[in-house]
Amino acid sequence: MENWLQRTQILIGKENLQKLQDSTVMVFGCGGVGSYVVEGLVRSGIGHLVLFDADTISETNLNRQLMATTETIGESKVEVLKKRALSINPMIQIDTFSVFISEENIASYVEPFSNVSYLVDAVDTVRAKLGIIQYAKAHDIPVISSMGTGNKLDPTRFEIADIEKTSVCPLAKVMRKELRARHITKVKVLYSKEEPQQIEPDDVHTTASISFVPSVAGLIISGEVIKDICGLGKM
């Protein structure tokens, strides 16, 4: 296993690779976006991951979530991701929590960990997103939040920006309003400038999604986290 990060080290340097190995990153939400965030972080050499997601893998996850296969249906998302991560890097430290994070409980899960390097918000609900961002800002922890990836077909339209500079994305619009009400500024997000696809209503009433959109979003986020930890980010 000595040489598995050799190509990464050539690109970012030995000192930056050590920064990644010394870092703790928390990923909230391990679905279509979050699972690929985890993948990107593991394969880049992050030393410690803390994963949060209360869901189990279902058949409807097969079209877009990294760890979803016919063999993992019914299993805990975070536990399957942990097993996959350890199969890539047996030396990685991973803690998992099968819980829904909220404004009320986030402190009790984050505070036991010291020197947290980054928080990644890949959850679906506005309230949980606000709780993650608010905690990060109050404790001076870098954070990045994923905006909507559903009803999209063009993965090339994703951008990293301050929440105040976002447009088009309906979720970003709601988040801008809520963050302003809380006087929270300078929040880094990933969002898409693609207009949502017009979907015919059906009996399911669920958000449409496809394999190649949330996966790209997740890898972009992981790249941003890695560059920020190494001091290579633009924002």
Image: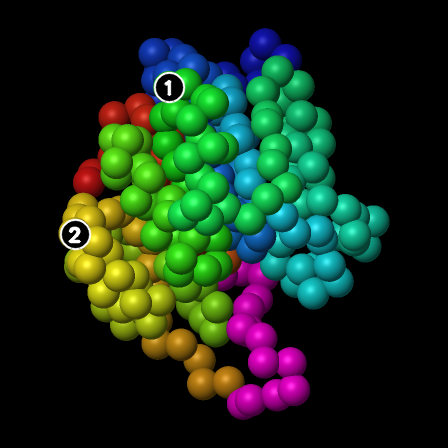
Q: Label 2 belongs to which residue?
A: 183
The one nearer the camera, 144 or 156, is 144
Which segment did they paint magenta?
Answer: 200-213
| Residue sitting at the far front | 104
Residue 43: name its quadrant: top right
Residue 20: name its quadrant: top left
Query: Do the residues bearing badges 2 and 1 touch, measured as CB atoms within 8 Å?
Result: no
What is the distance, in whole Å, between disc 2 and disc 1 at their CAs? 25 Å
Magenta stretch: dominant secondary structure: loop
Asked whether, in this view, residue 149 is left or right of residue 90, the answer is: left
What kind of element bears circle 2?
loop
The one nearer the camera, 92 or 95, is 95
222 drawn magenta: no
Q: Label 1 belongs to which residue?
A: 115
Viewer can see residue 216: no
- How many dots with numbers? 2
Q: Please determine whether, in this image, residue 14 is positioned above or below residue 216.
A: above
Provide residue 93's location: percent of width, then percent of height.
58, 20
Camera-nearest label, 2 or 1 = 2
Asked whether, in this view, residue 1 is left or right of residue 218, the answer is: right
209 drawn magenta: yes
Provide residue 111's location: percent of width, then percent of height.
42, 26
Asked whether, in this view, residue 192 is left or right of residue 53, the answer is: left
Could you tell me which quadrant the C terminus lies in?
top left
Q: Please determine whether, in this image, residue 204 is positioned above or below residue 212.
A: below
Residue drawn at (56%, 89%) of the image: 201
Q: Amino acid at mark 2?
A: His
Residue count near mark 2 (Cα–Cα under 10 Å), binned few <14, some 14–19, many ≥20:
few
Residue 84: name its quadrant: top right
What kind of element bears circle 1?
loop
Viewer can see residue 117: yes
